[in-house]
Amino acid sequence: MSNFNNTVAVITGAANGIGKSLAIALADVGARVAIADVNLSRATELAEALGPKVRAYRCDVTERSQIEALAEGVINDFGQINYVFANAGVAVPGSILATDPAEFDWLLDVNIRGVFSTIQVFVPLLMKSAEAKQAAHFIITGSENSFGISNTGPSSAYTMTKQASLALAETLRRDLAESAVAVSIFCPGLVDTKLYDARRTRQDRYGGESAMPQEYAERASAAMAQGQDPGVTAALCLAGVANDEFLIITDPKIREFSGKRNTEINHALDIVDTRLANWMTKQ
């Protein structure tokens, strides 16, 4: 069971949404927090509100050099790193056929390559913390979409990236099995955030910043408001991290669709059992 007091936590995508709530929750339990976000002014505003144990850093996770600069800055400022929350993520709605190729690249670069780079840069530092008998934990923000096709409407490319994030977490856990670095994947359900408005921070090479038309924004905001309070989501996440859980699920509604894949896998395995048995009898 982890004690967060006086540990150092790094959170990417921390200036809004779930990342912001994680930063607030960690600061409340005495952690020193590095708030990393592509929007430095928003990160700085939050850091100043949370007090002297919290600092802001600009970090675009699609740029590995910025992740490296973030790690160097946190070590220089805090002297250690104990928890890394690879939380930065973006989403766009629509089917695979309707997804713009530039936005597909954006989703891949933020949600998957960004996590990959964050792993490669920060895990060696966590291993040093573990060797020093300090807390060392890497947490990936997945989604209800990590477990199947959610009921919240088609965001097909986003769903693909979040299922890939589960594979990243599972393989990282295997790769670090001989170390003292813990790995978790945190999978919230629908949360009351502005994830729907991710294009406001979209980089130029992926299409540039774009505000959602007011009518659609109001509709999306109303839909997201039906989700879990992000403060509750963050508290449930930290409870799972403190307990060294690998799968941290924060919304029981995920049961409504997550079992479908297991049912299909078991059905396919039953079919292959029969086919192999029939094949063997013919030999």
Image (cartoon, rainbow, N blue to C red):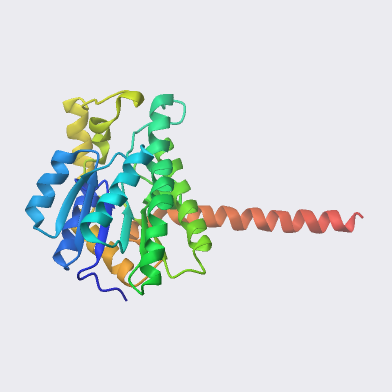
Q: Is residue 153 visible?
A: no
From the top left corner, tell me how far across and down residue 172 is, in percent.
48, 58
Report the side of 120 relative to 40 (left or right). right
From the top left corner, tell me how far across and down residue 69 is, in percent.
30, 45
Q: Is residue 243 visible?
A: yes
Give the mark count. Answer: 0
Which of the 4 image quadrants contains residue 22?
bottom left
The image shows residue 133, relative to residue 158, as above or below, that is below
Residue at 37% from the left image edge and 59% from the top image edge: 125
Q: Residue furthest right?
A: 283
Report the side of 216 relative to 51 (left or right). right
From the top left corner, tell me how far across and down residue 252 is, in percent.
33, 61
The N terminus, quarter of image:
bottom left
Residue nearest the observer in this picture, 184 or 53: 53
Residue nearest the observer in this picture, 256 or 76: 76
The image shows residue 223, relative to residue 269, as above or below, that is above
Report the side of 224 relative to 101 (left or right). left
Residue nearest the observer in this picture, 61 or 169: 61
Which of the 4 image quadrants contains residue 214?
top left
Q: Residue furthest front?
A: 76
Report the side of 202 relative to 51 (left or right). right
The C terminus, quarter of image:
bottom right
Residue at 30% from the left image edge and 24% from the top image edge: 204
Residue at 13% from the left image edge and 45% from the top image edge: 44
The image shows residue 151, relative to residue 203, as above or below, that is below
The image shows residue 219, relative to residue 6, as above or below, that is above
From the top left corner, tell me how far across and down residue 257 is, in percent.
43, 52
